[in-house]
Image (tube, helix red, strand yellow):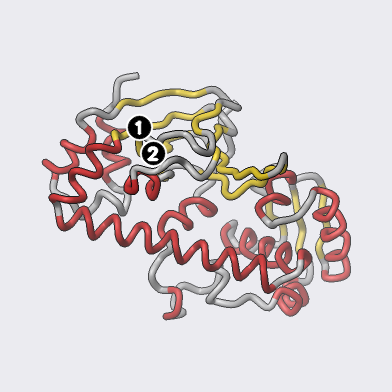
Amino acid sequence: MSIRSADLERVRRLPLFVPIADEVFARLTAGAFLQRFPAGADLLAEGDPVDFLYVLLDGSVELSGTWNDKETTLAVLGPVSTFILAAVILDAPATMNARTVGRSDILMIPGAALRRELEEDVRFASAVALELSGCYQGVVRAIKNQKLRGGVERLANYLLAQRSRQGSGATLTLPYEKRFIASLLGMTPENLSRAFASLADYGVEVDGPHVTISRPVALERLAKPDPLIDKHLPSDITLISKPDRERSQTLETYRPPRP
């Protein structure tokens, strides 16, 4: 597919590319191409060589990991977001699987061009460092969430985060299928169902993808949200004033896939 100038402008506004000069961005994208993938298309498998930085322009992508015939969802990406940046910079094999959830338009930027500009352009090198630092912060948050909280507490905080992102009303809509949410939270679908049932005592009612929280204060007392773990707390908290860039894009900018 040809790359429209409007699509390039959307990519240009990503924090990774904002600081760089126009000529640097032109060199980075000179060999790029745009490809449309159907839902369920495998983009990468663990261990594959990574030749391109992927920029998701439309649709949604699941990142997952496998071990010993087990698979877990690591993130679900929405537009506009990049992925596999660390592997591209290191010129290393992919450590995650990537597949489309819905029909997706993806811009693919050659990894060799990224590595060349990283060595030659200080502003781009700084932007890459900030991007990867944000990813690292996001990974630390996720590990703390998994290791310090039980499944019911993780679900409670997840629901509070979604409530905040969707306007803090009484009812929210789950952005993904429940199997994705279970995997994101480190739970089986059965454990997720039991966790939802446990939250009924805290004013949580579930009707398909719709969740009503009638007692948010009670749910917050259970969840005990922490600014060093959770990103849905007020942005004026200085401890979380610097955005976890790619992690933020991963979980906060999801759009439902197109039919």
Quarter of the image for residue 68 reads: top right
Q: Tell me the SS state at disc 2.
A: strand
Left or right, residue 118 beside residue 84: left
Figure label count: 2
The residue type indicated by label 2 comes to Val
Tag 2 or tag 1, which sits nearer the N-term? 2
Q: Name the spot of residue 60 as percent of width and height, x first.
A: 53, 37
Q: Tell me the SS state at disc 1.
A: strand
Q: Name the residue carrying label 2.
A: 55
Q: Name the residue carrying label 1.
A: 108
Q: Name the spot of residue 39 as percent of width and height, x first.
A: 58, 26
Asked whether the residues under the numbered discs 1 and 2 touch, taking CB atoms below 8 Å apart as contact, a structural biologist would say yes
Left or right, residue 37 beside residue 25: right
Left or right, residue 109 beside residue 26: right
The residue type indicated by label 1 comes to Met
85 or 235: nearer the eye?
Answer: 85
Q: CA distance from mark 1 to mark 2?
A: 6 Å
